[in-house]
Amino acid sequence: MHYLKAIHPILIILAITFIHVSPSHANKVKVAHFSDGSLSGWEEKSFVGTTQYQFVRDEGHQVLEAVAEGTASGFFREIKIDLNKTPYINWSWWIEETLQGNDEKSKAGDDYPVRIYVVASGGLFFWRTRAINYVWSGSQVEGSHWPNAYTARAMMVAVRSGNALRGQWMQEKRNVYEDLKLLFGREITQIDAVAIMSDADNSGGRVRARYGDIYFSAK
């Protein structure tokens, strides 16, 4: 179960179902429409208890709030993204605070107030699956990356770190194509799923965070 948590159920689900969906070729591809109060196309998966997700208003906008109290659950969406056309993932997030004292590079400390996963499926060849976890870290240096505590097929990237910007909305953009190439040494031109998760099950702590819309863009 912890292995699945590390790379999310998307990896197993895609390996089993091997669903064929035509990749998107638009210049902008919406993945999450949280500002519309919609979870259309998303599925929930629980690992340890259930993180509470609900839509709330924040600064005049609707966002998805997550509260994890010793729990780990999230949402995933199967969607094929052509990274040759739209390599940039864009999102916004907000945290109340990071977890403190947990070693994020260990299995016992693999918890984050916010995670956004991108997954390149290996299909039936599940061992070829690769995933990136973009996280708001409590202790790792911003911009650093390291293997997930459970599997080298998933890499962690500290997009933000620490509590200096807690309580503030941060707008993020990452070049997924370049990140996959850097982290795995391979040219991967398509991802197959995106996921979000707020978790505090390993540390037994509590986190509260919020997610804005997610989309891919050409620039």
Image (cartoon, helix red, strand yellow):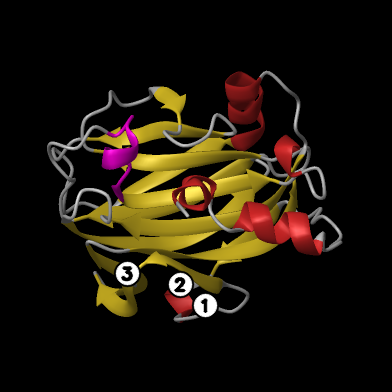
Q: Which range of residues does the magenta coloring cover? A: 104-112
Looking at the rendering, which quadrant does residue 13 occupy? bottom right
| Distance between the alpha carbons at the discs numbered 1 and 2 | 7 Å
Q: Is mark 1 on a helix, strand or loop?
A: loop
Q: Position of residue 87 (x, y in %)?
A: 67, 39
91 vs 24, left or right, is: left
Q: Name the residue under label 3.
A: 51
Give the numbered dot on residue 34. 2
User: 81 or 77, which lies in front?
Assistant: 77
Give the numbered dot on residue 219. none
Q: Name the residue under label 1.
A: 39
Instruction: Inspect the image, locate mark 2, and give the three-letter code of the amino acid beneath it.
Output: Phe
Q: Position of residue 171 (x, y in %)?
A: 38, 47
Mark 2 / mark 3, whichever is N-terminal: 2
Measuring 52% from the left and 36% from the top, which residue is drawn there?
174
Picture layout, residue 101 above or below residue 26 = above
51 falls in the magenta region: no
